[in-house]
Amino acid sequence: MDIELITFLLISLCAIVVVKCEKDNSMDLYNLTSHKGRAKLTWVKISLVLMTALVLSVIMYLLKLSVYLLKFGGEGADFPITAITDFSGSKLQLDILQTALLFMCIKTLGWIYLSLIVMAVATFLKSSASVATTVICIVLLPAFVASKMQGDEFIYKMPLPNGLLKAR
């Protein structure tokens, strides 16, 4: 299984569980009756999901990076990024390892954005199955449509995390 898919499933599952466990146990009715329950618990849930998305995405990307370093070796990591054919026209003065860390930051922002979308969808929809289906459509459908189009600019113009998650 791809590490991106595992990250997607873990972050989505965490966001759905955090939002849905409150509604399934009727705690949302109790929390709406007090000001502290309404305000404090909301920020705690959002912070929990964002921290989980941050930690999971960094761990998964570092795991992927370490597999690449073990497989190919790290002796060329200090070469400039322009040594790679795809980045030959780049104006960035970064080496390959710095570029990989920059991609990690971009992907982490994408995963955090995705977790916020999952939480918003889970708040509005009642069943977990409909939340999962909607989130899968939000992520996979634009990626499928963009893969069939000629240019990559479509995926970056959409207000979805797909453009950020596409960083390699």
Image (spheres, rainbow, N blue to C red):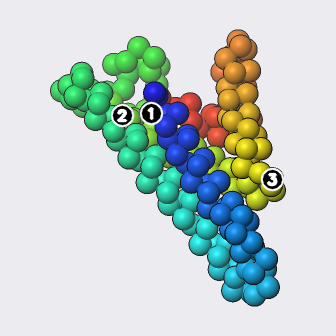
Q: In the image, what residue occupies the spot 29% across and 30% down?
A: 67
Q: Secondary structure at mark 2?
A: helix
Note whether 71 is above or below 16 in the view shown.
above
Front-most of 35 and 112?
A: 35
Q: Which residue is mark 3?
A: 125
Q: Secondary structure at mark 3?
A: loop
| Residue 72 in the image, given as x and y percentages of width and height | 24, 21
The three-letter amino acid code for the residue at tag 2 is Lys
Q: Nearer the viewer, residue 101 or 17?
A: 17
Residue 8 % position (x, y): 55, 40
Choose top left, top right, bottom left or bottom right for residue 139.
top right
Residue where numbered disc 2 is placed: 64
Q: Residue at x 41, y 47 (%)?
A: 58
Q: Residues within 10 Å of mark 1 (few under 14, many from 20)?
A: few
Which element carries disc 1, helix, strand or loop? Answer: helix
* Residue at image point 55% right, 41% down: 9
Give the residue type at disc 1: Ile
Up/down of 16 relative to 61, above or below: below
Q: Mark 3 or mark 1: which comes first in sequence?
A: 1
User: In the rendered view, does 23 fall on the left or right side of 64?
Assistant: right
Mark 2 or mark 3: name the one nearer the start of the chain. Answer: 2
Residue 3, label in figure: 1
> How far apart are the alpha carbons under marks 1 and 2?
7 Å
Whether label 1 touches label 2, CB < 8 Å? yes
Do we see residue 113 in this rendering? no
Give amino acid for label 3: Leu
Report crowding for label 2: few under 14, some 14 to 19, many 20 or more residues within 10 A (C-alpha).
some
Residue furthest out toward the front: 25
Q: Is residue 48 above or below residue 67?
A: below
CA distance separating discs 3 and 1: 28 Å
- Which of the pair 150/114 is nearer the observer? 114
| Residue 110, percent from left and from top | 58, 44
